[in-house]
Amino acid sequence: MAASLCEIFEARSVAVVGASKDPLKAGHQVVRTLLSVGYLGKIYPVNPNEEEILGLPCYRSISEIEGPLDLIVVSLPGRAAITVMEEAALRGDIKGAVVLSGGFAETAIPENAEAQRQLAEIARRAGIRVFGPNCIGIMNPETKLVTGFHPGVSLIPGNIGYITQSGALGGSLVTLALSQPRPLGFARFAHVGNMCDVSNVELIEDYGNDPRIGVILVYLEGVRDGRGFMRVVSQVTRKKPVLVLKVGRTEIGARATLSHTGTLAGTDAVYSGAFKQCGAVRASTMRDLIAGAKAISMLPRPRGRRVCILTEAGGMGVISTDEVEAGGVLKLAPMTPETCQKLTTSLPPMAMVCKPNGYVDMSAAAMPREIGEALRLVLSDPNVDMVVLNSIPPTFKPAMDVAQAIVPVIKEFDKPVATCFTVNAAMDETRRYLEENGIPTFDTPDEAVRALAMLTEATFRAGQPFVDVPTANHPILDRAVAEGRHLLEPEALEFLRDHGIAAMPHVLARTREEAQRAAREMNGPVALKVVSPQVIHKSDVGGVKLHLQGDEAVGQGYDRLIEDVRRAVVGADIHGVLVVPMAPPGTEVIIGMVRDAQFGPTIMFGLGGVFVELFKDVSFRVAPFDEEVARDMIRETRAYRLLQGLRGEKAKDIASLVQLLVQVSRFAAQYPQIREIDLNPVRVHEDGYSILDARILLE
Amino acid sequence: MAASLCEIFEARSVAVVGASKDPLKAGHQVVRTLLSVGYLGKIYPVNPNEEEILGLPCYRSISEIEGPLDLIVVSLPGRAAITVMEEAALRGDIKGAVVLSGGFAETAIPENAEAQRQLAEIARRAGIRVFGPNCIGIMNPETKLVTGFHPGVSLIPGNIGYITQSGALGGSLVTLALSQPRPLGFARFAHVGNMCDVSNVELIEDYGNDPRIGVILVYLEGVRDGRGFMRVVSQVTRKKPVLVLKVGRTEIGARATLSHTGTLAGTDAVYSGAFKQCGAVRASTMRDLIAGAKAISMLPRPRGRRVCILTEAGGMGVISTDEVEAGGVLKLAPMTPETCQKLTTSLPPMAMVCKPNGYVDMSAAAMPREIGEALRLVLSDPNVDMVVLNSIPPTFKPAMDVAQAIVPVIKEFDKPVATCFTVNAAMDETRRYLEENGIPTFDTPDEAVRALAMLTEATFRAGQPFVDVPTANHPILDRAVAEGRHLLEPEALEFLRDHGIAAMPHVLARTREEAQRAAREMNGPVALKVVSPQVIHKSDVGGVKLHLQGDEAVGQGYDRLIEDVRRAVVGADIHGVLVVPMAPPGTEVIIGMVRDAQFGPTIMFGLGGVFVELFKDVSFRVAPFDEEVARDMIRETRAYRLLQGLRGEKAKDIASLVQLLVQVSRFAAQYPQIREIDLNPVRVHEDGYSILDARILLE
């Protein structure tokens, strides 16, 4: 049985295979780093051509090493790495391997990918867990285990669990974390490289179960198994925050193929939706990731979203307030009249108190004692969940005095306080003092607000468990698959109805007279729509006629429709013409399903019409999901305000739309035969909805 | 005659009035700072109660100072400051005064505002220019003149001219500038405080004429005279870049009162439009302002917008590329096949060259010589205007070697290169070396791209001269003003026609029969619209009937309209019913005019319908403006893509829309009697446009 990842992080002995005397070689640098940081376990350099390296006896091969061996770090090119893995398999005691060497699958050369497969297979059979290849491996600051060779990276123990898909950027982020006034502390660092075995998803799960870890930081370029990611992360975020920096945000996926709106289904938008759905918080820049990690690892959880901005300088206060409003996560705290009154009394007359409420400009005239008192008043207010304190003391008011005045006040309360003391070498000591007292400091007033926003999102956005549904068959799908075609519209409507979805009443007319009869029975204006397996975009070929009323209009419409389609699609097999009543007015939205390469069946929601394309105002979630996720999905788009009733219009039936989204998400996950769903538009009325067009394409 | 601002910056003698022995007093700190930075002029402490301060003889009053006196720094409260100004006026040789003291107009207490007015008036009569009150004044790094007391601020000479509206934030930004690997150099620093005399606009003009200044940096909370700002900045940006950090970006102006879209006319959106119009570049954060200033002050101007991303690490490269695409200012350089071929040959086999074109991942295996060579190849390509170089050397490749390889290459070319060497204490020396060689370094790969984007905007966005038009009268306006009402719709249409704007054909019908006759003559479906001074929102009261054709329909429509309006607006004075033909199809846009408190007549453009409100996708410009500004205004919104023809639709007549915007902007500036204009919607056809509703409200 393979070892747990924890046993590998806790390795008590490491062999560095490919150790070298050449200071420019990675195999040298790993040994040197282990020695210099003071690794608590045993270090075995392995190199058949050396007697000793950096004062340590050198072994000809790992088989020569006596005593137990937990971990090997392999710094040898392709084939040689495989040979080492074979030797490692023979020993039987090795729990893990970090393969530093590149030149495997990342090169996109078939032989190299095959070599990686072999390497993984040998390790799997021997129960050895592999990090990499092409990675700088792992660090455990507690035991001073470091398998990488990034300059200047030397972790300090703490509660952050870190996972990176890029060694270089991973290292950069760590150095950013270490360059804070008080370096951030880590419990674990792992670079996954090519992920031939240990994946970022497995690490998230492992960190989730590790009581040492309070917050998980992930640098992500992509996940291989999106649904596995959803299952794991939605569980982990119920226990601790997961903060993600995902790059590639503008790469509009060419894969996404929603028929009408193909350019929209950007993979990155799917990632964003998936993160929200499973409760992960997305940071937008490297700096924000570190700022968020600092806030989450240092601060108590807020009880709500209400922030008070307390500032010594108007400019900084305005920047903070801008960020509160623009960020949309926090809101200014509606402080009680008593608090505002007391603040006015205790602050200098130049202070601007609660204009607007939740914003207090204490003025530069406020002295340390007054600042401390204002902070106490604000933190005592039950309507304040957290505080941003901006301070730019002039020289006549030493920054350290302000810091010493606020530290005891903050400790009286269990509420998060983020501080921004102006960026300035003269502030370094003060900032260090604050951070050593558990109070995070940020470089700019907007960063402080974003950090609290990430803390708040992490607090209130736990994932719903992501549970897949079993796959199934359906006779309508089976028949179409057998005939090698997509669903015809009447079939699509029937299929929807079979899944509890209210489709429009409709009649398939095969003659002019049948159409007229159906229209008469519908007793109002109707639409005619061609039914033909050859016609996907009906409107484009004259296959839709709207607003027809009366025998004459319907008959003429029928004839013209047949004529237009025959002319536009020569040889089209016309099964008939669908007669449907014209739907009552409402707000038009679009619901789509596409199979994402990573996340599988994924539902898109947005406003209908050209505006989808123009504003890209759509939201994505991974199917299946429940009502709560569906509601979030609607709220995320501007369609929400329209559905709520803009400018005195009556509110539309959002509850029925929520149900529809949930139902579509369920059968999308249930039937892998379905490649795409396009309900476009769905017109949402004050009561219920009408699906004006339903297309279901099969694989 | 008052002195020029330049003479004040070059002051050869300074009296500090209110100098003190108490180290916590500003009056002490100013003297100490002048001494410690080594001010090249004479320093005269003034305090009737001291013999000497910090080793300098102290004067009882400024009248006692012998020899010429150029500048006084006043650190005394309200009344005392006025007395000092009176004394200063008597001397006759004083050119300028910096009033540090607060407690004037910023307190919003009437007596204090009056004191400020007195202070300014005394100075004005004496020809003394005043900075402040409530400000930290000015700095001239050349002569080491510093009138402020911000901790740690000590400027290094350079080509940046800096203007700030906040002393504290201004100081913060300067310390950020000074904390760069090579501190940024300044030519001038000025904090304007309450602007009782010298304003930020005057300083921009002054800096614009100062050959020492290469780039103007402005921290702005607001301008008092928006049109003066437009006139000055649009001239200055033709000579040198103006980079602005404007805060208060979310304060949706309550002032803005476009009738239908009142919530949209946010003052900040007006500022954004005004900046674009006059050629100022807006930075979005404090960090970006400094990054932009660094790029602009250090780099040559790019010849185009095409950037090559050259990276040693995929993650950083992707972050840069994301920012190029998301920022929308730059685009990836379409390098020639020869360049791509040569790069492939000269870089290690692991490198990913031109996937996509313009993006080169050299891989961690690229050694300094190869990096230098790749950079040379890229810079030699005529399709490359600038380069971002990301480097994260592992320890086996010292960063300094990379820096030394690229410096000579960059010096061979006259193209901007921005570098991002990973944030890391171990990189400090390398970054300093690069910056001392004129190559700016940035902390993160996205920051490097944004800095180049600001440089590019500054290069290609010079302002058009802003020229006001003389005000005028018009009989239609005169009549309505005299009758104390807004324009009726037929008047508005006539007024538009008088200004060369194609209004719809229309007939004012006073009876059912007149309406029928007019409709018959229009020979097609018509719309009826009530004309009544009491009815502003016609649709809301049933005052609009659409799609009427034939005598019966028109007659019924007329009757119902009158009935509906009479019921909804009891006692409405109905002048008649406007009969207009239904307009052909097209794209609906909105053109509005509102009088902004700062910028005066301001034009808004956006998509029509509820989407204006939903997406706030509108652009603003200050009236009057020319075709180029109008085109920018259209391009800035998503309406542009719709007007160009989405999904195979034919393009609409954008040229006619440009003309319409220009015409509206002209008469908006010409007639101060007009408070608001609302052409909503304007339907733009393939040829021409129809103004479907025109409302002109008067003051």
Image (cartoon, coloured by chain):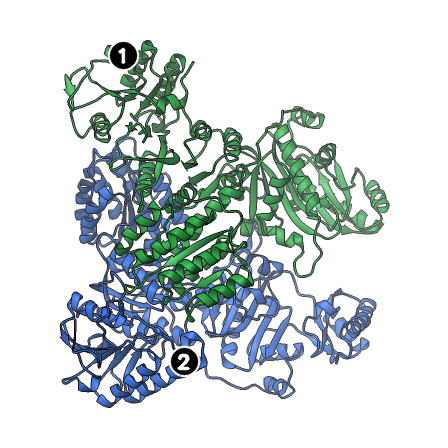
Chain colours: A blue, B green
- Is circle 1 on the same chain as circle 2? no
The secondary element bearing badge 1 is classed as loop
> Given the image, on which type of amino acid does mark 2 rest?
Asn
Q: Quadrant of the C terminus of chain A?
A: bottom right
Of B134 and A84, the residue lying toward us? A84
Residue B184: where, in percent of width, then height? Answer: 34, 41
Crowding at dot 1, Cα within 10 Å, few <14 / some 14-19 / many 20+, comes out as: few
Q: Can you tell which mark lies on residue B67?
A: 1
Instruction: Residue A93 in the image: state x and y as whole percent.
Output: 20, 86
Q: Quadrant of the N terminus of chain A?
A: bottom left
Between residue A668 and residue B91, name the one nearer to us: B91
Please report the residue visible at 51 percent of the width from the left and 61 percent of the height from the top: B339
Residue B588 or residue A19, whichever sits in front: A19
Q: Marks 1 and 2: which is nearer the front?
A: 2
Q: Residue furthest top?
A: B90
Tell which subunit mark 2 falls on. A
Residue A597: percent from left, percent from top: 49, 74
Q: Which mark is residue A496?
A: none
Vertical comparison of B651 with A120: above or below: above
**In which image quadrant can residue A592 be found?**
bottom right
Q: Is residue A477 left or right of residue A540?
A: left
Taking the image as shown, residue B424 lies to the left or right of residue A284, namely left
Reading the image, the residue beneath label 2 is: A112
| Image quarter of residue A199 | bottom left
* Residue A545 location, quadrant: bottom right
In the rendering, at what x and y percent does residue B612 appear? 58, 49
In the image, residue B11 sits, relative to residue A216, either above or below, namely above
Disc 2 is placed on an element classified as helix
Tell me if I can see residue A243 in this picture: no
Is residue A161 in sight in this rendering? yes
